[in-house]
Amino acid sequence: MAHKGKLSRRKFLIRTGLGTAGVLALGTYLARNPIRRSVLQTLSTMDLTYVGDTDDPLIWFELTADNHVLLLSPKVEMGQGIFTGMAQLAAEELEIPLERLRVVHAATATGNIDGLSTGGSTSIAGLWEPLRELAATFREMLRTEAARKLGAPLSGVQLKNGVFQYGDSQLTFADTAAGVTDWNLPETPALKAADAFRHIGKPVARVDLAPKVYGDPIFGLDAEMPGMLYGAVLRPTHIGARLLKADTQKAAGMPGVVQVVEAEDFVGVVARSYAQAERAKAQIEAEWEAPVHLQQADIEARMTVGNGKHTIIQKEGGPMEGPEGETLEFRTPIGAHAQLEPNGALAHVEEGRATVVISTQVVGLTRKEVAERLGMNPEQVNIIPAYLGGGFGRRLHTPHAVPAAVMSKAVGRPVKYIFSRQEEFQHDMFRPPTHHRMKGRLGADGRLEHLEHHFVSGDVGNNSALMIPGVPTILGADIGAVRGGLLQYTGVPNLRAVYYHVDLPFATSWWRSLGLLANTFAIESFVDHMAAKAGQDALTFRLQHIPQDDALGARLRAVLERAAKASAYTETVRAGRAMGLAASVDAGTPCAQVVELSLEEGKIRIHKVTCVLDPGLAVNPDQVRAQCEGSIHMGLSAALYEEMQVVDGALTPVIYGPYRMLLMKDAPREIEVILLQGKETPGPVGEPPLGPIGAAVANALFRLTGKRPVRMPLAKSI
Amino acid sequence: MPVKVTLTVNKTVHHLELEDPEMPLLWAIRDLLGLKATKFGCGKAACGACTLLVDGVPVRSCSYPARLGKGKTITTLEGLGTQAEPHPVQQAWIEEIVPQCGYCQPGFMMAAAALLKRVSNPTDDDIDQNILNVCRCGTHTRIRKAIHKAATLAQTGQAQPNTPEDGA
Ligand code: FES
Ligand code: FES
């Protein structure tokens, strides 16, 4: 039973910066060129404001008759644990037991729509205040009604465990709300002080644990509708391929086929089962025109520092000139998202309305795209987000909702459209390949006098459907590609970070942590190299170049020192085991990692990873740990093994296995996560621990073999 | 030509008529029986998301024709245990808070249950050699801990194994 009443739409929660995405806040900064402020300041001032409606508790909360509170989340759960974090934030102010709060995805029809996306590790940090304020306001709205119903003075109504009490009388939330049509909005109540927290900061179990362990049908691809059919869409296997002609006669006659759908921009088949749709699709006789000559070497030649337009994104002192000094070059490959649940959508288009169930990180954008294609108003389209079987940025654009809707409209029945795994690999929006030229020179005192990072990357944010047109041109730099590309060693008098933009013939975009993994690999490998040149250990050398007198610098020093101590970091190879250290700061969250590894029968064996992260306040320490572990595994997988290549004009491989990923046998036997709290509020968590891992492995390999790996995937360097 | 097949899934006998004689067991289970725990990840036996047990042996059901399930005993995650009566593997998964996105987890749990059936106290090497599923979220270290814990739970009888039958 849901209650929804009239609400006086007085704007009572004034948020600064509402309407500008975090994206833009950083953008404004980068546009100020030349840049005077340090990288650490930049990252620490990143705006993480939640973009959406934070005025109306009644679109965020519903009550059930059995006295549960439903939290309608405009953010999606893709494994990152935000439903749990959001439940903790809301329950804290609602004064209810955690098990009485249920978080569900808000369908767009509820009106609670995220104005941007779920991504960038911003959800909990961005909702930290707004969600608690909404919950506190909702609580006081209820208390006001409870006082009226109980005939009590407001101050006399106590709230315990989700039940209002006045003398001997009691009222549940549901009873309180029953029949109320006109809510009075109180002033925004003061929020609880940190020392009174009962839920926040506790390592409570994930709220979605049971459904995920007992196999409930919660994912996008699990959705069903009566009379549902399966759709498949013809897609090219080659980059830049153009469809010249498609003969669908044979496909139309295949068993189970209901209809062949020839739309203005795609050819699809609708059949009674998934396998039948796929088999029929394979029978479409298509003629393509494609540049089949394109090879990996062409891509790398293009992706080389010096090509394309460049933008100086960090500039202190002068440039490094003359022959002295060190230069090293690094490369990272094209990376696939490879999330386990393929993309797909279940759409049902009816007269005057459409419903789409989908795993997406961009609920609002998907609604807009479907509505535009169907010629409907956005309000006629209801997007029902489901749990995502992995996101990692892959679902920051889900335009495949459109063909699902078009096919549904054509056959007049619900249609579920699922990417094949081959399509998932070939039509990914990849992590772009990168090339880096690091330069540095030591002064007479053995400290860095110059440090420079010149790098080229394919697009990350520039061609994203989320990007506001014109912004890339204003910025000159891709806001995703530069993540982690600025040098955190601001104690070095002469610093340069220069970004080069080169276009690629295939789509690249957001991949968990964006440029951070590649950029940190280059920077932290090179700093390690310079430490060795200076005859210093990797920790001392780093600390020498990080200022103590700014807040973020102090936090970065702290994670580095703690990681070295906790891992008993040493540069001596013992019993065939070597250690590597690296650190990064991402969006204001510092992280340091130490990897301990050896070679067993010529293969890299990771024994232990020590990870020290300072996310500020950890709303749920266990889930922050889980995000560290996840980032470490995903980062190790990418750094050690993963690689897409362009062969004869096609992206390959197209299946797990040949696209080698970290398996149980490769995973570290031990991961130790230590959380520091260097600030009072929560900061980003889901991506920052992906920064150091590649460099930490490379640095350990250097200790072990004396050879510095300069190319990912690192397993190939052995 | 449609084929008739009788499948025993989670102790229930189902008489199915397969319009498509090549329909993979995965889709018969998901679409005809409505059991959604078994996941589609790749359709090519390469990820393990669709792992279930056929006569107690782990099988990648995306690449196993449903008609071959005739006369065999099939167990999916729904049949492994329930919230009221969890299998030791599920109990351990809960205690170690293993899942992130959760999409790969049914496959991992089925592979783990099969391993524990053969090797009651698996070593790390046993795990490495037998659990070959893919997890993108990176839950590997928790999966390893949970498998060891499940072995202990099963031995101490703290969670009653609703042991998948092997049809023997
Ligand atoms: S779906 Fe069967 S192994 Fe991937
Ligand atoms: S938990 Fe997401 S893929 Fe394993």
Image: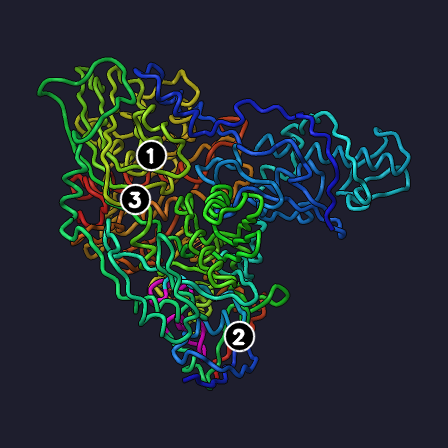
Up-down: is A646 above or below A618?
below
State the extent of the magenta-drawn residues as a range.
B43-63
Residue density around tag 1, few if under 14, some if 14–19, many if 20 or more, within 10 Å: many
Of A369 and A646, the residue lying toward us: A369
Of A603 and B10, the residue lying toward us: B10
- Identify residue for label 3: A507
Q: CA distance from mark 1 to mark 2?
A: 53 Å
Q: Report the amino acid beneath label 3.
A: Ala
Mark 1 residue element = loop
Is residue B53 covered in magenta?
A: yes
- Identify residue for label 1: A462
Q: CA distance from mark 3 to mark 1?
A: 11 Å
Q: Are marks 3 and 1 in contact (CB under 8 Å)?
A: no
Q: Quadrant of residue B108?
A: bottom left
Query: In this rendering, would B29 be left or right of A205?
Result: left
Q: Where does ligand 2 appear, by image quarter?
A: bottom left
Is residue A327 shown to the viewer in this render? yes
Of A577 and A643, the residue lying toward us: A643
Residue density around tag 2, few if under 14, some if 14–19, many if 20 or more, within 10 Å: some
Q: Residue furthest left?
A: A323
Q: Residue at x 49, y 53 (%)?
A: A358
- Where residue A667 sits in the image (x, y, percent)? 34, 53
Q: Subunit of mark 3?
A: A
- Where residue B156 sits in the image (x, y, percent)? 55, 67
Q: Residue at x 19, y 42 (%)?
A: A711
- Where residue B110 sits in the image (x, y, percent)? 46, 67
